[in-house]
Image (spheres, rainbow, N blue to C red):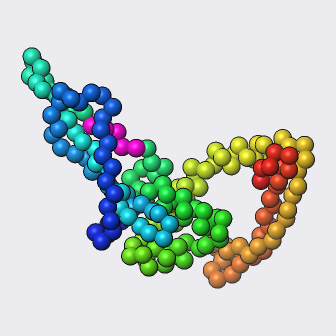
Amino acid sequence: LALPAHLPVVEIIHEPTEDVSAMQCIGEEVTEELGYAPASLFIRRHIRRKYITAEDAEGNQRVAIAALPERPLPKCEASVELLTQMIIDKHVYHLPIYRQLKRLAQLGVVIPASTADNWQRLLGLLLRPLYAGLRAVCKTSGYLQADETTLKVQDRTKKGTTHTGVMWVYHAVLQRVV
């Protein structure tokens, strides 16, 4: 995904945690991600300064560089805020991916549907431990409410047809967990 040049850029400079006052800056590592603020997009440019020590008695030098902040999807051009908004829009507000992408295109950024689908899939994998914890709390609850809802489900093996699926939702009332 090529980041558009027309977006404003927010630069964040990361310095190494060690003392670099006796070192000489020799360059920078730049990592860009597509940031998100409601109804606007921008580029957040992480600039990690690189320093090198003076030569020691044996002629050796050492390079120091700030660590890149941890991200949920390594090498992903989307920021945590953008990924979070897309997950919330899809699963809380039931806004399909194609409509989210249309909205982003109106803001001047075209993201392939396959890329957005992949982000959703990978973020879903990251949320599995949360699901497992919520499920364990529900299963050990002494008081559960259940809801059975039918919905149309597409079948990859049958093109153009759907069948009726069933979704069961459990609510641990006392723990306030679904």
Numbered-mark total: 0
Looking at the rendering, the stretch of residues picked out in magenta corresponds to: 65-69
Q: Point out residue 73 in the picture as x, y percentages from the top left corner.
A: 46, 52
Please indicate, yes or no, whether residue 114 appears anywhere in the rendered image.
Answer: no
The residue drawn where x is 59% and y is 67% is 89
Question: In the figure, residue 158 lies in which quadrant?
Answer: bottom right
Residue found at the far right of this picture? 143
Q: Position of residue 83 (x, y in %)?
A: 50, 59
Residue at image coords 10%, 24%? 55
Q: Indicate the position of residue 161 as horizontal and vertical percent values.
A: 69, 81
Query: Is residue 108 in view from this perspective?
Result: yes
Residue at position x 48%, y 70% in the image: 39
Q: Nearer the viewer, residue 6 or 90?
A: 6
Q: Main secondary structure of the magenta part?
A: loop
At 27% from the left and 37% from the top, the residue drawn is 65
Is 166 a magenta residue?
A: no
Q: Is residue 19 left or right of residue 26?
A: right
